[in-house]
Amino acid sequence: MIKIEHLRKEYPNITPLKDVNAEIYKGDVISVIGPSGTGKSTMLRCINQLEMPTSGTVTFDGEVMTDAKCDISKVRRKMGMVFQSFNLFANRSIIDNVISAPVDLLKVPREQAYKEGMELLRRVGLAEKANAFPDELSGGQKQRVAIA
């Protein structure tokens, strides 16, 4: 069983997880769904200790994963999770991620690719994030960038 108690995750400008509590029993298959930016991917990363929660506890089969003494790699071997994957370049802005293939592979002129890339970002609702970097976006926003 996975038991989540009072899980909280804070970043400098946002708190995506506030007092999350849940019990997931052996054999349960669950989906975490909701609007973009509401903390779904953050919650999964905190449960699996890929990211440390600000506070709260995650217990798996009696082992408190949020305890510094816990052997996380041992616990992870018994747990299965599926995450979103986008393959965005972390060192490039969102617009640069969108236009890199057309410019580098298809030899589309950069100005034309930029114009088309901005239109694609508008279509997925992320034009205002064009100059942001992937680590500044939620999981759902990264997914939409990958779609663009």
Image (cartoon, helix red, strand yellow):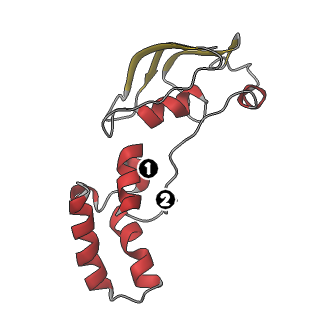
Q: In which quadrant is the N terminus drawn?
A: top right
Q: Residue at x 71, y 30 (%)?
A: 76
For disc 2, the marked residue is 90
- The label shown at residue 110 is none
Q: Residues within 10 Å of mark 1 (few under 14, many from 20)?
A: few
Q: Vertical placement of 85 versus 68: above or below?
A: below
The answer to whether 118 is drawn above or below residue 79 in the figure is below
Pointers 1 and 2 in contact (CB under 8 A)? yes
Percent x, y of residue 129: 27, 56
- Label for residue 135? 1
Q: Nearer the viewer, residue 120 or 64?
A: 120
- Residue at the (36%, 87%) spot, across then down: 108
Please give left or right for residue 91 compared with residue 33 in the image: right
Q: Amino acid at mark 2?
A: Ala
Q: Amino acid at mark 1?
A: Asp
Helix, strand or loop at disc 1? helix
Does residue 28 appear to the left or right of 32 in the view shown? right
Q: Name the foreground residue: 11 vs 127.
A: 127
Res 11 → quadrant: top left
Residue at (48% x, 84% y) in the render = 105
Q: Position of residue 144 (x, y in %)?
A: 35, 54
Q: Secondary structure at mark 2?
A: loop
Name the N-terminal-most of marks 1 and 2: 2
In terms of image quadrants, where is residue 123? bottom left
In the displayed structure image, the side of residue 74 where residue 36 appears, left or right: left
Q: Is residue 26 above or below residue 29?
A: above
The residue carrying pointer 2 sits among few (fewer than 14), some (14 to 19) or many (20 or more) residues within 10 Å by Cα, namely: few
Q: Position of residue 109 (x, y in %)?
A: 33, 89
Q: Where is residue 40 drawn, in percent x and y? A: 42, 33
Query: How far separated are the C-alphas under marks 1 and 2?
Result: 7 Å
